[in-house]
């Protein structure tokens, strides 16, 4: 199923920006649907953004206009640019790679937004 390694999380003030990266290995990256999910304490994991093999994207309503997902198939990497961050964006962010209904997860990276 390959491996996914996230990076780029951290502590930021409200209104700030972060860029998450997810490096993939052991898979034909360009063929995969890639997604970013997040899970806040006490809440279910939710989809934040996704990008398919053709470059089409979709976003959760809560992040539309603030977050941008992109992929670089030459680097086997998917990114999540997060702008205008809010305290409610605080969560562990996970990268997901899916093909034919089978998904793999990264270990997650913590994003904390202070008010």
Image: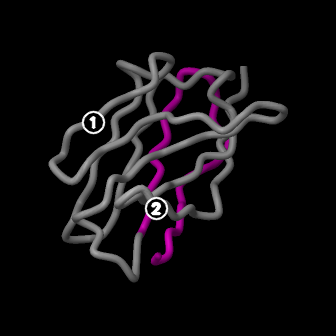
> In the shown orientation, is residue 91 left or right of residue 82?
right
Quarter where residue 98 is shown: bottom left
Q: Which is more N-terminal, label 2 or label 1?
A: 1
Q: Quadrant of residue 13?
A: top right
Q: Is residue 115 above or below residue 41?
A: above
Viewer-nearest of discs 1 and 2? 2
Q: Position of residue 37 (x, y in %)?
A: 55, 42
- Relative depth, front residue between 101 and 65: 101
Q: Residue furthest bottom?
A: 26
Q: Is residue 114 above or below residue 8?
A: above
Q: Main secondary structure of the magenta part?
A: strand
How was the colour assigned to the protein in this rendering? one colour
Q: Which residue is mark 2?
A: 102
Residue sitting at the far right: 42
| Residue 18 on the magenta span | yes
On screen, 72 above or below 52?
Answer: below
Q: Secondary structure at mark 1?
A: strand
| Residues rendered magenta in the picture | 1-23
Image quadrant containing the C terminus: top right
Among the 4 quarters of the image, the one containing residue 74: bottom left
Asked whether 88 falls inside the magenta stretch, the response is no
Residue receiving disc 1: 57
Instruction: Identify the residue shown where x is 68% and y is 48%.
Output: 110
Which residue is at 84% across, 32% downward? 42
């Amino acid at each position: 199923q390959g491996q996914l390694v996230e990076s780029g999380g951290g502590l930021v003030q409200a209104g700030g920006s972060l860029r998450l990266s997810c490096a993939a290995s052991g898979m034909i990256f360009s063929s995969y649907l890639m997604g970013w999910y997040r899970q806040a304490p006490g809440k279910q994991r939710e989809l934040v953004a996704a990008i398919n093999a053709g470059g089409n994207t979709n976003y959760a309503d809560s992040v539309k206009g603030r977050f941008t997902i992109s992929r670089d198939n030459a680097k086997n990497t998917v990114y999540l640019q997060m702008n205008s961050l809010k305290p409610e964006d605080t969560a562990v962010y996970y990268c997901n790679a899916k093909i034919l209904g089978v998904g793999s997860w990264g270990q997650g990276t913590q994003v904390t937004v202070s008010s």
